[in-house]
Amino acid sequence: MISNSKRWIYLGVGTLLLIFCGLIYGWSLFKEPFSQVYPDWSLSQLSMTFTISMIFFCVGGFVAGKLSAKLSPRTIISIAAVLMLVGFFGVSRMNPEKGSLAMLYICYGFLGGSGVGLTYNCVIGTMNKWFPDKPGLASGIMMMGFGLGALILGSVATGLIASKGIFSTFMILGILIFVVLILGSFFIKVPDVSAGSSGGEGKKIYGEGPSVMLKSASFWLFLVWCIVVNIGGLMVVNSAASIALAFGAPAIVGMIVSVFNGAGRVIIGGIYDKSGGKTAMIVDMVFMFAGGIALLMGAKTAGMILILIGLLAIGLCYGGNPTICSTFVNRYYGPKYFSVNFSIAMFNLVPAAVIGPMISSTLVEKSGGSYDTSFIAILICAVISLFLWMLVSKTVQIENAKRKEPRPF
């Protein structure tokens, strides 16, 4: 019998690893320093770095899901550590006089994003096997760490940039992340099925593979719901520091979105475990609508308090989305093929990472620096997501009616 305390120790280490990987969401802190070094680079070109990192984050997660059947978690995380070290080292060696966007895209976007994706899927997929009784809470805690990474390491990065410069900062961060991932990989282990795990003894492991999941209408409707919610969230997350600066606050204040990004993952995960997916999705949409209203009112009145409220609400919404995605896939399609199914579902970030920042950058540029139209776009996303939620709920009900054993939602 695996002790209850042991799985919580592993969960703690897994969360620590995701904190360091969560720095990928701190791109808005790096964007301004890069624009000062390379003034010829446009806002859209710099935002593309984040988009590319999100795309390869999803690709890395998919590869990790496939590799999980052949390689140990320790090996997968070690590969990720090398990718991130090489990527951050590459950024640190960029020419300050004549920078290369392609090099930034490859090193931060491709290598960094892939490394984060490998670690993210490996840690969450492995740790969820230790918590069959609390998938929402376990996913929420780990994803909280991932969401807080931008704030915790972002604060460190901001100080390093001020004292060492942007390029030396990437060198230091690359080494730090590499060391933490390598050491932490020793604690990420698959539980012994024969021994069972606390909360999961004697439970039959059920599940439908990707071939079945991809044929179900519920999956595609849910995927579109995730895309719409993430588009609304990324319009703020991608520009959190810039939004803070635009309304007279220090850039680091924008990282309040990371605090509540992390909190949203635990809050929504707990709601999902207790009240189900329909309620969790409703709460998530309420956060997005409230955030959009607060941001728009703050922009109209130049009220920094309202802007902060809006940032925290959007952070809660965006943070809740991956927890909902993880728990929905785990409960509705089963834990047996979770790693692969979850990595496929996380591809919802690809279109969202392209569309969200693109809409935000375009609207801000065309409005002469005003964020009003971006905040209105968030409200439109909230309305669309509500319609999709109704379709998801109805489709799940229809599918369960055809099953001999209905699946929890």
Image (spheres, grey):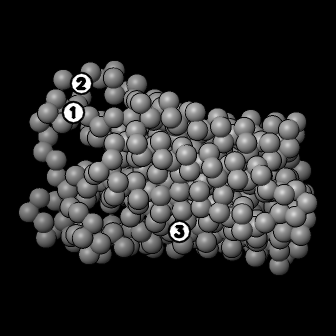
The answer to whether residue 38 is left or right of residue 295 is right
Q: Nearer the viewer, residue 214 or 268?
A: 214
For image coordinates 42% across by 50% down, the residue present is: 121
Q: Quadrant of the C terminus?
A: bottom left
The answer to whether residue 350 is left or right of residue 73 is right
Residue 145 seen in this snapshot: no
Amino acid at dot 2:
Ile
Q: Are marks 1 and 2 in contact (CB under 8 Å)?
A: yes
Instruction: Using the numbered discs, state the Cα–Cα distance from disc 3 to disc 2 in whole angstroms.
Output: 38 Å
Amino acid at dot 1:
Asp
Instruction: Using the numbered discs, state the Cα–Cα distance from disc 3 to disc 1 in whole angstroms.
Output: 34 Å
Q: Are marks 3 and 1 in contact (CB under 8 Å)?
A: no
Q: Determine which residue is flagged by label 1.
A: 192
Instruction: Kindly state the secondary structure of the residue where label 2 is placed.
Output: loop
The answer to whether residue 51 is left or right of residue 307 is left
Q: Determine which residue is flagged by label 3.
A: 350
Q: Is the residue 402 above or below the residue 169 in the image?
A: below
Location of residue 376 in the rendering, given as x and y in whole percent from the top left corner: 69, 71
Q: Is the residue 395 above or below the residue 242 in the image?
A: below
Residue 346 seen in this snapshot: yes
Dot label at residue 2: 2
Q: Nearer the viewer, residue 174 or 217?
A: 174
The answer to whether residue 253 is left or right of residue 368 is left
Location of residue 85 in the rendering, given as x and y in whole percent from the top left corner: 62, 45
